[in-house]
Image (cartoon, grey):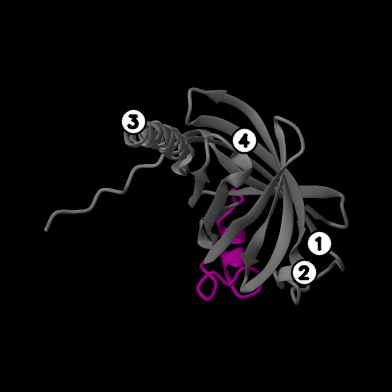
Amino acid sequence: MKCIFTSAKSIQISFVVLMSLVVTSFLSIDALDVRLAVEPNHSTILFSVPISNGMTRVTGKFKEYTMDIEYDSIQFTNSKILVNIKAASIDTGIDGRDDHLRTADFFDTETYPEISFVSTSITEIDSTHFLLLGDFTMHGVSKQIEVPLVLNGKDGKYTLGFSARLSLNRTDYGVGSDFKHSSMENFIGDEIGVEIDFWTKKWKAPKTEEK
């Protein structure tokens, strides 16, 4: 009888352990990062630059970029955000100015073709406000920056809308630091306003061409 009792007890313990493993496995699967991508038709990366000693502003955008989230649907702060921008895709609405911005006077896009951001941590302020800390690289210079992030809404599990507003000092990255205007000092302001609005979709691997 003692042997039977011990066996039954062992079975009971094994069952509890098994159920624990099943539950843990289920939660782990649900919490695994799902890769989300920006939906470009409804997303923008905008910037604005004060010029003429602040008398007016020039605005523009980057047209080519990827923005992916290694998304934890259970705990968003465990997620990771990765942004890659093609510097040559800058668009201020004037071709001649955009060509100049691509030269070594400013972005030098042949030498530094990409602008990137990789988050290293996400801190929750409240249910819709977060603070990203991450490594931002532009014009060959990398610095750690903070990015306030707002969750504007959610539709289903993987469609999320975010916005971010921040400013960057272009001289910290050597963009246009040596440029001198022909007739006005301090023609271009240092602080660049950045506005990012995007929503996400589940990432799909790009199609490969058949040979």
Q: Which mark is residue 162?
A: 4
**Residue type (three-letter) at the residue carrying disc 2:** Thr
Residue located beneath label 2 in the image: 171
Judged from the image, the secondary structure of the residue bearing numbered disc 4 is strand
Residue located beneath label 3 in the image: 1
> How many angstroms separate mark 2 from mark 1 (CA)?
6 Å
Q: Nearer the viewer, mark 2 or mark 3?
A: 3
Which residue is outermost to the top? 155
> How many angstroms separate mark 2 from mark 3 (CA)?
83 Å
Give me the residue at 57% from left, 66% from top: 102
Which is nearer the N-term, disc 3 or disc 1? 3
Disc 3 crowd, CA 10 A, few/some/many (<14, 14-19, 20+): few
Query: Compared to 146, does 138 lie above or below?
Result: below
Q: Percent x, y for residue 13?
A: 42, 35
Which is nearer the N-term, disc 4 or disc 3? 3
Magenta span: 92-113
Query: Compared to 70, does 190 lie above or below?
Result: below
> How many angstroms separate mark 4 from mark 3 (CA)?
65 Å
Which residue is outermost to the front? 1
| Secondary structure mostly taken by the magenta-highlighted segment of the chain | loop
Query: Compared to 131, does 145 lie above or below?
Result: below
Q: Are marks 2 and 1 in contact (CB under 8 Å)?
A: yes
Disc 2 crowd, CA 10 A, few/some/many (<14, 14-19, 20+): few
Residue 13 falls inside the magenta stretch: no
Residue 107 falls inside the magenta stretch: yes
> How many angstroms separate mark 1 from mark 4 (CA)?
26 Å
Residue located beneath label 1 in the image: 190
